Amino acid sequence: MTQGAGQGPVREMTAGWSPAVAPGYDPTIRDARVVSQEYPEEYEEYTPTEVDLPVIGSPGPLFVVGDVHGYLQELLDALHAQGLIDAEGHWAAGPARLWFLGDFTDRGPDGIGVIELVMQLSAEAAAAGGYAKALMGNHELLLLGAHRFGDTPVHSQAGTASFLAAWRLNGGQPTDMERLQDHHIAWMSRLDAATVADGHLLLHSDTTAYLEYGTTIDAMNDTVTGVLQRGNAEECWELFRKFTKRFAFRGESGPQAVRELLDTYGGRRVVHGHSPIPYLLDEAGGEQNADGEERPPVVEGPHVYADDLAVAMDGGVTMDGRLLVAQLPLLP
């Protein structure tokens, strides 16, 4: 499959990433809390998106991870290749800083395993003087909505829809829903939507829709969290719909869209996931080999565009591309 699938140095790790299903769990129950009041004590002391956590000593190098979409083994391989984890899948980078740009589940085989790994690395990195944090992707919103609201009707531009139907149509994996537990829900529900690190505005989606939720990063993140806390199906659907928009940074108007975000939220360059690089390059179909068979798109690394103001990090792992992990700033 992608970048060493089946051959990586931590190939056997995935067998351990399957938390048990909670007794009596119904994945589509409508009155379940979006944010659980009860989750294991080990998650109470560490907040993966807290911006003022102390960093011991000088800050280490900064890394970002593009969309994972359930490809746990590819994530383990990519993190190991960058020296961020050891062969057993534990944090090995001391004071390094790591940001995941969202979309941990759907389409790939083990979204819950990915969430468990990110939560584990968050705790391990903090203990080592670094950090591993995560941002909210549109697929986190989709999974939370499918769990919370099930097939409750919501209004969409195409007519009546539901979170559960949209989740299924967008690669929702039944095994992820079956294994989803309260502490996963609580963790996802607290994720910020954007942050600034070393002059980079990090966010999931290549859209200016973030601006509709606040004129500062703190205000926008608080608004997004508030939407999830209130638990109104229509309001959550509108948030999901807006964060699913893409391609705002392409074309002649793209640089101006990026500048609008930077002028509002800070930073000198936007780094995002969401839109696969082959789509941004109009290469989603790939090329044909000598036998007439379609070759997967070639993704060499992050894609810099919009007058060098934007960096795309979704390498298209779901379409036989690559799961990208890169150090910032990017070298010329």
Image (cartoon, rainbow, N blue to C red):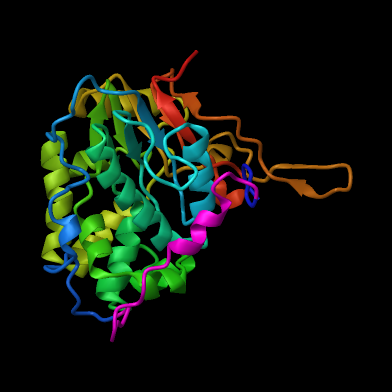
Q: Is residue 156 above or below residue 246?
A: below
Image point 29% across, 39% down: which residue? 125
Residue 199 image point, x, y percent: 27, 20
Q: Is residue 48 above or below residue 95?
A: below
Give the total of numbered labels.
0
Image point 21% across, 69% down: which residue? 233
Horizontal side of residue 247 vs 48, given as left or right: right
Q: Is residue 165 above or below residue 287?
A: below
Is residue 10 inside the magenta stretch? yes
Residue 262 image point, x, y percent: 26, 25
What secondary structure do most residues of the magenta stretch adopt?
loop
Horizontal side of residue 38 vs 70, given as left or right: left
Image point 32% across, 29% down: which residue? 96
Residue 287 image point, x, y percent: 75, 41
Residue 260 visible in this rendered orientation of the protein: no
Residue 115 visible in this rendered orientation of the protein: yes
Q: Is residue 244 above or below residue 181?
A: above
Is residue 156 inside the magenta stretch? no
Q: Quadrant of residue 94?
A: top left
- The magenta span reads 7-28
Residue found farthest to the right: 291
Residue 246 image point, x, y percent: 41, 43
Is residue 79 or residue 165 the one in the foreground?
A: 79
